[in-house]
Amino acid sequence: MHGLESGAGTESVSAWIKRQIRRDEIERYLDGGKDFIDEGHIERTLASNVQAPADRIRGILQKARSIKLLDDADVAALATVTDPELRQEVLAAAHEIKTAVYDNRVVTFAPLYCGSKCVNNCRYCGFRSDNSAVQRRSLGMDEVEAEARVLAGKIGHKRLVMVYGEHPDTGADYIADSVRRVYAVKEKVRSGVGEIRRVNINAAPMSIADLVKIREAGIGTYQVFQETYHKATYRFVHPEGTLKGDYHWRLYCLHRAMEAGIDDVAIGALFGLYDWRFEVMGLVAHARDLERRFGVGPHTVSVPRLEPAAGTDFSWVGHWVSDDDFRYLIAVLRVSIPYAGLIVTNREKPDMLRSVIGMCTQRDADTRVGLGAYADAFSGSDEQKAERQQFMLGDTRSLDQIVRELASMGHIVSFCTAGYRCGRTGKKIMDALRCGSEGHLCKLNAILTFQEWLEDFASPDTRLAGEAIIERELSEVQLRVPGDFSQAAFEHLVDARKRIMAGERDLYF
């Protein structure tokens, strides 16, 4: 079945397409008919800040330590650094800023792909509508539940990013139903209950009314990536006449999400479509416009690179990003949008992931991107199948292996979702991140949720490595009493950890 065939209910796909874009929900955000991506300004700013002197770069890095969005000239100066030694200083600052805001925590999650049907025809995507090499279907609710049972009950994930194609079969009602179905899963594990506590979604742009529907289902962060901010490239890779071909409908979808009451939103670019320096400038411009209008920047920024996909020709790509440039652009983003979480994914190979994780806050683990692939993995079929996934993965290692590796590198894996459930979202979490208080709470919650995961899912070797990290973290918290932590908080932490080891679950600050 191809992406443009029958849709949900009795409505035709073509009729569904015609009613998706609401011009009034674009025009309300334009300034004098113009959007916030001023290409001429971006190009001039990049050109005029090439080869900035080292003392200026160091001054910019000092500004970034205030945990505020950098201005365009400073971002351009960082993006155009080519001197290897100066780049190393930027990389070092990126590690320092990540630690200052987020400590040594790394959050893990899994993507759950719910549909391969799509009405769009993007040149780079394995799910594009004219690609006959890919199988087309959407998961039924029982299948969604089966995937969630594996993720929550056998692997131990607490967070998902649910991924949907742009198609009436996986529209707002389907998204809301599938999110509720995942939250309902409760699986008995060793000592507790396996459950998904936060469902983020990666979905197509929607109207405000549809965004309200999915908000009411309890979604976490809403991800929509512009893919490329360069308009000519955007037109080239997203054919005219398709829903995704409307640059502005996509550009302002997160503005609509804010209006719909979804205050955790996520941006990203698909690196390789155009010059990465321009895309970094576009991401910062996007963050700035969200801050200007709503007082809240993006909760996270993602950095996917182009990857091979079945039936997809990449001979037209002229902006492949080298490994060195990829590491460096991550550093530039960390410094430029210092308050945002930074997500790197299993598109990358293990060596690359190890080299950048110190600048990032989240990564996926035990990832499968084929429809129904998690259930398959526990029924004897655990291999990538190009014909049923959007792209090929670089890392398919287990969550247990990745947790153990991160522990060996000095990182604690956090499974915490407490902040979101306590209402620390949107502006509240942004303010808390800037002043450091969120990092303190998250350090405590990371210890508790990691202990819970070790009890319920870890292999013996991973448990040993994890316990060592927890003991180190407890010692560090104790050393920071009474500065960052109170004696009462430390005593509560020690007690809560003991209660988790005795069988209690979901304890948090």
Image (cartoon, rainbow, N blue to C red):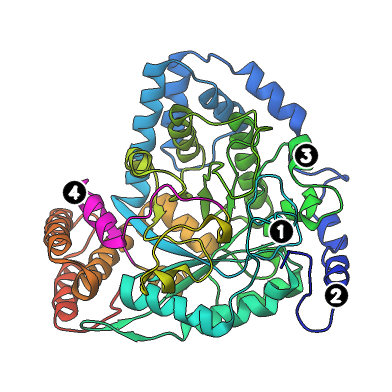
Q: Residues within 10 Å of mark 1 (few under 14, many from 20)?
A: many
Secondary structure of the residue carrying tag 4 is helix
Q: Position of residue 389 (x, y in %)?
A: 55, 58
Give the amino acid at mark 1.
Answer: Cys
Foreground mark, 2 or 1, reads 2
Gap between marks 2 and 1, in whole Å?
Answer: 24 Å
Q: Quadrant of the N terminus?
A: bottom right
Position of 106 relative to 174 (above/below)? above
Does label 2 or label 4 sit earlier along the sequence?
2
- Could you tell me the amino acid type at mark 2? Ser
The answer, for residue 369, to whether it is visible in the render is: yes
**Distance (Cα) linking label 2 and label 4:** 54 Å
Residue 422 shows in the view:
no
Residue labelled with disc 1:
253
User: CB of mark 2 within 8 Å of CB of mark 4?
Assistant: no
Nearer the viewer's eye, disc 1 or disc 4?
4
Q: Marks 2 and 4: which is nearer the front?
A: 2
The kind of residue tagged 4 is Ser
Dot 3: few (<14), some (14–19), or many (≥20) neighbours within 10 Å? few
Q: CA distance from mark 3 to mark 1?
A: 21 Å
Looking at numbered disc 3 in the image, what kind of residue is underneath it?
Phe
Q: Nearer the viewer, residue 495 or 19?
A: 19
Q: Residue at x 69, y 32 (%)?
A: 316
Q: CA distance from mark 3 to mark 2?
A: 27 Å
Q: Earlier in the sequence, mark 2 or mark 1?
A: 2
Disc marking residue 408: 4
First in sequence, mark 3 or 4: give its number: 3
Q: Is residue 417 left or right of residue 494?
A: right
User: What residue is shown with label 3?
Assistant: 236
Residue carrying label 2: 12
